[in-house]
Image (cartoon, rainbow, N blue to C red):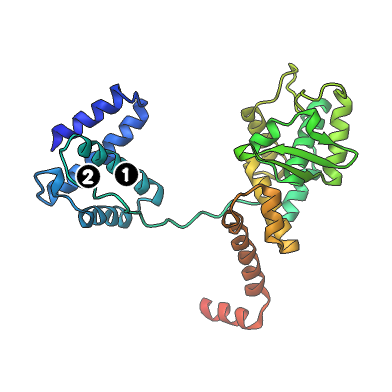
Amino acid sequence: MRQPLEDFLLMLRNARQLSPHTLSAYRHDLQGLLAHAEQLQRSDWSQLDQADLRQLISARHRQGIGGRSLQRQLSAIRSFYAWLLERRLCRHNPAIDLRPPRSPRALPNTLDADLTARLLDSRDPDCDDWLQLRDQAMLELFYSSGLRLSELASLCIGDIDLRSAELRVLGKGRKVRLLPIGRKAREALQQWLQQHPAPSEPARPVFLSKRGGALGVRAIQLRLQRHGNQRIGQHLHPHMLRHSFASHLLESSGDLRAVQELLGHSDIATTQIYTRLDFQHLSSVYDQAHPRAKRRRESDDD
């Protein structure tokens, strides 16, 4: 059973020219399959059936392996068996229609409204005026419009209409959406663009480096990390501001469909994760305020 496995990996390296990292993942996943087959005392790949694979996946799931890793292993097994079928080394593919257990989706990290206000209303004393204006405009726009990092980095002058307070964004799947710009973000953008006016250059990036080129995603991440540490004493990632935008908007309006449109989610199920955040907030308020909840908590402490 080892030889067909090695031949398959050799084909991936030479014919498909997969990267060393991807090849290593294939080898790891398929060696796990081989070890399972040997433990079951199977002597040929055709002897493994779907029940055997389900046993493997269930055992790995009990060990704490997440759904994505299990899905990757099943994908490797399906590809391996498809190759075996092509060479008539097997008559079936036991991984077809087999799905891994779903892992619970992690809740996004957000800032509460007070911490967000502290972040946006503070100033970095060690930051010069030029950087201060640019970074303030970035922070305000992230939170005002719920942008992705890539969307903010690719913004051009022609995408912004400060008179109508609208923003044109090219999102995932090259889908265009129009977003409102909040008052504070509009003021911050006006102050920044007064430093670098470009009314006749619609293709010029909005956010520039000191050398005059477009500010890259990594540079934006580093600037936000700096301001997170300086202003609120914690790590700040651009998506925390996007998540905070969605959570705060949903908390105030309860309009899930509108939040979906603003975020540019194609599937509302993606947006529904913010309802879980909202429920966590409501549960916390309930536990702190409801007489029965208080009594229960006090009794739990006894």
Graded by Cα atoms within 10 Å as few (under 14), some (14 to 19) or many (20 or more), the crowding at tag 2 reads many
> What numbered label is drawn on residue 73?
1
Between 301 and 22, which is closer to the camera in this rendering? 22
Is residue 45 positioned above or below 210 on the image?
A: below
How many residues crowd mark 1 within 10 Å: few (<14), some (14–19), many (20+)?
Answer: many
Rendering coords of residue 60 (x, y %): 29, 52
User: Relative to residue 136, is residue 247 depicted above or below?
Assistant: below
In front: 19, or 77?
77
Left or right of 285? Residue 18 is: left
Q: Nearer the viewer, residue 244 or 153?
A: 153
- State the residue position of label 2: 33
Q: Which mark is residue 59?
A: none
Residue type at mark 1?
Answer: Gln
Q: Is residue 111 visible?
A: no
- Say which label, 1 or 2, has the lower sequence index: 2
Question: Measuring 16% from the left and 37% from the top, which residue is drawn there?
Answer: 88
Identify the secondary structure beneath mark 2. Answer: helix
Question: Is residue 220 at all visible to an observer of this figure?
Answer: yes
Find out whether the residues at labels 1 and 2 contact each other: C-beta distance under 8 Å: yes
Q: Is residue 29 left or right of residue 211?
A: left
Residue 265 screen position, x and y as percent: 62, 49
Q: CA distance from mark 1 to mark 2?
A: 9 Å
Can you tell which quarter of the image residue 283 is in?
bottom right
Q: How many marks?
A: 2
Provide residue 184's location: percent of width, then percent of height.
85, 44
**Where is 290 relative to 25, above or below?**
below
Res 168 → quadrant: top right
SS for callout 1: helix
Q: Quadrant of residue 238?
A: top right
**Quadrant the N terminus occupies:** top left
Which amino acid lies under the numbered mark 2 shown in the image of this protein?
Answer: Leu
